Image (spheres, rainbow, N blue to C red):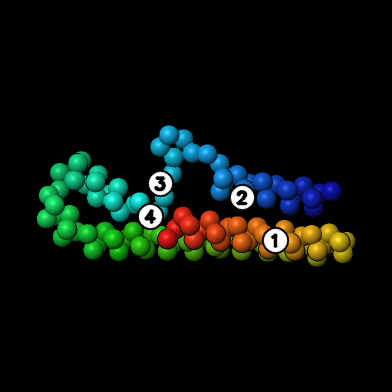
Amino acid sequence: MALFVVGALCGSVLTYSFTAPRGAKGRKSAQNWAPGLFRQLETEVKLTPEQVASFRPEIEEAIRKVKDTRRQALIQSDLEIDAVLARIGNQLEPDQKLRMEQFRAKRRARVLRWIARHLQ
């Protein structure tokens, strides 16, 4: 019973974190980081278009590094949870082990799709 509760909690937390509705501002998608940052620099810092063009490569490289770091952190977190689920699965009855493996495969595919979609 405890194993089922742990699995359900892990699945619920991940599912909610990936599908929960965001507030009016919500999280910005990683695809929109650069345009949003450049707009802010132009309006709040009053950078000229020439200055934005000059700084663009450096800013885009920093954003790329941040996206890579976030992607790796999410993948590592997913691997940690998957390892726990695998250890739990080893303690289950044969029919439960099969269902756990199916659950892990579906969960992992869902998480990787989310990472690919949101951290391009």
Seen as rendered, the residue at the extreme top is: 24
Give the structural element (helix, strand or loop) at label 2: helix
Q: How far apart are the alpha carbons under marks 3 and 2?
A: 19 Å
Q: Are marks 1 and 3 in contact (CB under 8 Å)?
A: no
- Amino acid, disc 3: Lys
The amino acid beneath tag 4 is Gln
Q: x%, y% of residue 14? A: 61, 50
Q: Position of residue 42 (x, y in %)?
A: 19, 46
Q: Determine which residue is flagged by label 3.
A: 28
Which type of secondary structure does the marked residue at label 4 adopt? helix
- Given residues 87 and 111, the one toward you in this image is 111
SS assignment at label 1: helix
Q: What secondary structure is marked by label 3?
A: loop
Q: Nearer the viewer, residue 49 or 72?
A: 49
In the rendered structure, the answer to whether residue 53 lies left or right of residue 63 reads left
Callouts 3 and 2 close, C-beta under 8 Å: no
Can see residue 102?
Answer: yes
Q: Amino acid at mark 1?
A: Arg
Along the viewing direction, whichever of 21 and 63 lies nearer the viewer: 21
Q: Residue at x 13, y 52 (%)?
A: 49
Q: Which mark is residue 104?
A: 1
